Amino acid sequence: MTTSSQATARVAIIGGGPAGLMAAEVLVEHGLQVAVYEAMPSVGRKFLLAGVGGLNITHSEASDLFLSRYAERSAELGPWLAAFDGSAVRAWAQGLGVETFVGSSGRVFPREMKAAPLLRAWLSRLRAAGVSFHVRHRWQGWNASGQPYLTSPHGEQLLSADVVLLALGGGSWQKFGSDGAWWPWLQQRGIALSPLQAANCGFDADWSPHFADKFAGTPLKSVRLSCTGPSGQSLQRAGEFVITASGVEGSLIYAAAALLRDSISAHGSTLAYLDLLPDRSADWVHAAVTHPRGSRSLSSHLQSRLGLKGVKVGLLHECLSKQQFNDMAELARAIKALPLRLLRPRPLDEAISTAGGVSFAALDEHLMLKALPGVFCAGEMLDWEAPTGGYLLTACLATGRVAAQGVVHWLQAQGQMESRQA
């Protein structure tokens, strides 16, 4: 990196996702020369993909509940999210001309339910402010002389900047740029890291061929999932998920993914329990199941008395032995707490996001690497995780702001911004 107190300080942002773009926005407002380097042919590719089904930009729930979604990292993220919370995200989108609304679940979406208009408006504003973009420029770590360098369509080039801000994402969805390639390069520089793990991911179950063939792709709606982590943490939540050919995935599974993953890591596999009729009491279910059914088949009885059919009855057959299924007391208990054994998370590259990354112990309060002064980190490459629902994007934006403010603070301390302060 270079230094100069006479010219405008130069900041290189590596990674053109939400964290990097938010950092660029803050930095250019301080009169800095900002260049964004992106390995993909365009910036924001994972952001666009996340918006295919309707971009969920944040959540409207109360701040204490919102912060709890970050679990063991809530203490570190708390001050940053307080400074840039869900209301601030909505105001930011409004400033880009994007109207938002709160859905029935409390999630916040753009009125158009699309990511592309927001990204276009954002990039237009950044370019107008002077941010330069360099796509197909892939950061390769540091060379033998300790200088950061990139590969580009024009060959290798050294990175000439006063400050480097890394916003490289996690290790999921490699084809959209988040490949975790940075991990060994930071490790080689002595940076404390936690292994990257799948988060917001599906899980494998040992389905029979018959069940997989019949129900793969079928949504399982109106159920409640309960699970316990290896340290005794528990989660109980209602929602829905999808049966896949290999196991399960979907919003309810993603909400429990951290506990499920950690429990599998500790024990080799784990049990989640499904309440197939969460709006009915155990006593009601027992009475309905044991009600005389006459000449009707058990399947007909379950459908007529309890409204159970299709994939829910299929799961009962799949997860219970024949003896258990035909024991009415056992069947009634299983309807309220069906044990579902999960074997492993799906591969890292299939996950929506990742856990692990740069340890907070390796960073100062401004998100600068203690071992590499002048190098900052932001976004999903930090060691935190959160469920889907707007929490991921909000924290990426918030950490991008913190890192950018840290850059400004560091440059001021180095005497490189004195003549430019208002």
Image (spheres, grey):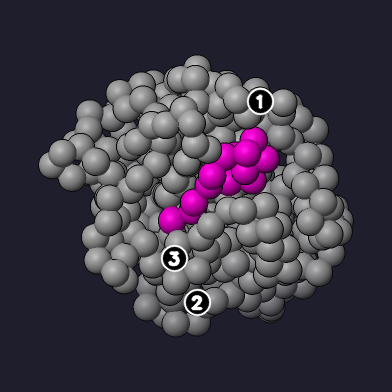
Which x, y percent locates residue 296?
69, 78
Does dot 1 land on a helix, a strand or a loop?
Answer: loop
Residue 382 visible in the snapshot: no
Give whichever of discs 3 and 1 has the lower sequence position: 3
The answer to whether residue 219 shows anywhere in this view is: yes
Q: Could you tell me which residue is drawn at 68 percent across and 67 percent down?
A: 120
Please say if 196 is above or below 407.
below
Tell me which segment is drawn in magenta.
23-37
Residue identified by numbered label 3: 135
| Badge 2: residue crowd in 10 Å (few <14, some 14–19, many ≥20) | some
What residue would you read off at disc 2? 216
- Pinpoint residue 420: horizontal percent, then vertical percent: 63, 29
The answer to if 130 sits in the magenta stretch is: no
Q: Quadrant of residue 172?
A: bottom left
The reply to whether dot 3 and dot 2 touch (C-beta < 8 Å) is no
The nearer-to-camera label among 3 and 2 is: 3
Q: Which residue is mark 1?
A: 421
Disc 2 secondary structure class: loop
